[in-house]
Amino acid sequence: MITNYKDLDVWNKSITLVEKVYVITKIFPEEEKFALTNQVRRSVISIPSNIAEGWGRKSTKDYIRFLHIALGSLYELETQLIISEKINYIKDEDLQMIVLIIKDL
């Protein structure tokens, strides 16, 4: 039974995604600390945060709007990680692992 956002599979899987992305971005160059690293982390944090915020609005219309925002952040994250792989900040295997988690959301 779903009684709050923490019971949602999508929220729990997005928390796992946050954990994985934080591990991967630890290897980003120091000069990216306030650029790509920060942006990737903000994108991934936005996903479960918007799911939770939408749930808390207690309105189906607002909840759907926040789910769309979370989805936008998910696409933003995927794009940033593709860029990270292209510029050799992450390995293709790491990117593919994240893509599998994204597809499972």
Image: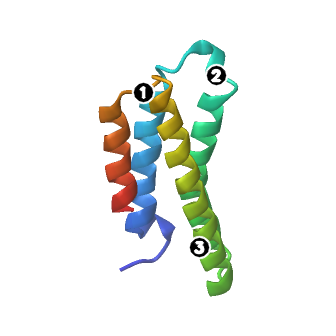
Image coloring type = rainbow
From the image, tell me which residue sits under label 3.
55
From the image, tell me which residue sits under label 1.
90
Compared with 91, 100 (above or below) is below
- Residue 33 is labelled as 2
Distance between the alpha carbons at the discs numbered 3 and 1: 33 Å
Compared with 97, 68 (above or below) is below
Residue type at mark 2 is Lys
Q: Quadrant of residue 62?
A: bottom right
Distance between the alpha carbons at the discs numbered 1 and 2: 15 Å
Closer to the chain start, of discs 3 and 1, is: 3
Residue type at mark 1 is Ile
Residue visible at 45% across and 22% down?
88
Density class for disc 1 (Cα within 10 Å; few <14, some 14-19, many ≥20) is some
Q: SS class of the residue under badge 1? A: loop
Position of the C terminus, as image quadrant, is: bottom left
Residue type at mark 3 is Trp
Distance between the alpha carbons at the discs numbered 3 and 2: 32 Å
Q: Nearer the viewer, mark 3 or mark 1?
A: 1
Q: SS class of the residue under badge 2? A: loop
Closer to the chain start, of discs 1 and 2, is: 2
Q: Position of residue 68 (x, y in %)?
A: 60, 70
Circle 3/circle 2 CB separation < 8 Å = no
Compared with 16, 30 (above or below) is above
Residue visible at 37% across and 49% down?
99
Density class for disc 2 (Cα within 10 Å; few <14, some 14-19, many ≥20) is few
Q: Position of residue 48 (x, y in %)?
A: 53, 57
Count of numbered circles in the view: 3
Q: Quadrant of residue 47?
A: bottom right
Compared with 51, 44 (above or below) is above
